[in-house]
Image: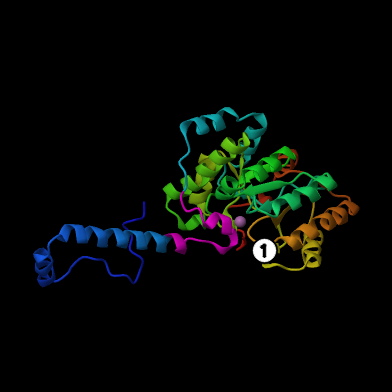
Amino acid sequence: MATDRTPSGRPAPRGRPPRNRRRRRQRRFPPFALAIIAIALVVGIVALIARGGDEPVASTAASEPVIPAVSEADIAAAASQLGPRDQELVNIGQTGVSINKAGGSRKYVALTFDDGPGPDTPAVLAELKKLNVPATFFVIGANIKENPDIFRQVLADGHEVGVHTWNHKDMTTLPAKEQQAEIESTAGEIISVGGVASRLFRAPYGSVDPAVLKQAEKAKLLSVLWDVDTVDWTRPSADQIVQTAVSQAQPGSIILLHDGGGDRASTIAAVPRIVKELRAKGYEFSTVGDLVISDPPGADDMSSDSRSTQQ
Ligand code: NI
């Protein structure tokens, strides 16, 4: 735990001059008073740390600073669900890289939605259902806990899900133990709420380094980034989102969109237009897992670097 950490700028409560200590000793209940001061300090520090770690992008996740432990049973369940398809995905991810797109031999693309499940997710699901398009949702663990029914609807509609961590922090800034907790807790929540094991991982902000990729490998997750960034989180118009997605898509593209982290009205409006325009150009749609298994990424489609800043 981080309760022994002192935020910069705040002096630690030790090293008082001897005269102060002597005066304290003369009071009637000095240990009691000291205990209250200590408790108040700890509470204050914890509050500061919790607030400092919040990301405005994932407002629902931000209110959930506690990462639950994953039970042995959940981990065992995940391991037992590693079927042949899972193994193929895991094998692609065992090389210290993220995939940015599939190989490009088939005219398929994958739509991906990050930062849910949240209030705008049902509208995204409704559009995808009308269009009969499967997609991939990279979910935040805290948001699954808050919106379990929406999360189950994502799965019931036949979409694929991937781990987008519990708190949406920049994983490259965390110690190994916290990186592991961010991944395992979310993978465990996916299993306990949705009944399926995810084999995909997307780092918040696309921020990865060898240590983060190692953690994904340990959890048997394939790290997935993207090659088309619609930057829909900056709230462009639906026209701009459509224009970016359609003009940049190529065979095997993984297209980044968001169903959480704020008002997604432009994204919701853009989805049917992206699908219709790409279909008119001869593209079909697939989940990330099916895309990369049917059209494996080549060396140029993978990287060990961070992708860019995003939500
Ligand atoms: Ni995100």
Tell me, yes or no, whether the highlighted magenta stretch contains residue 32.
no
In this rendering, is residue 268 above or below 198?
A: below
| Displayed quadrant of residue 7 | bottom left
Which residue position is annotated with label 1?
233
Label 1 near ligand 1 (CB < 8 Å)? yes
Task: Tell which of 54 and 171 is nearer to you.
Answer: 54
Residue drawn at (89%, 50%), measured in percent from left and top?
282
In this rendering, is residue 267 above or below 197?
A: below
Q: Is residue 84 left or right of residue 8?
A: right
Task: Tell which of 6 and 299 is nearer to you.
Answer: 6
Residue 286 at x, y percent in the picture:
77, 44
| Displayed quadrant of residue 262 | bottom right
| Displayed quadrant of residue 105 | top right
Residue 186 at x, y percent in the picture:
54, 44
Magenta span covers which residues?
50-66
In this rendering, is residue 283 above or below 243?
A: above
Helix or strand or loop: what does disc 1 sit on?
helix
Residue 67 at x, y percent in the picture:
47, 47
Task: Tell which of 190 and 231 is nearer to you.
Answer: 190
How is colour applied across the structure in the image?
Answer: rainbow
Residue 54 at x, y percent in the picture:
50, 61
Residue 300 visible within the image: no
Task: Tell which of 43 and 233 is nearer to you.
Answer: 43
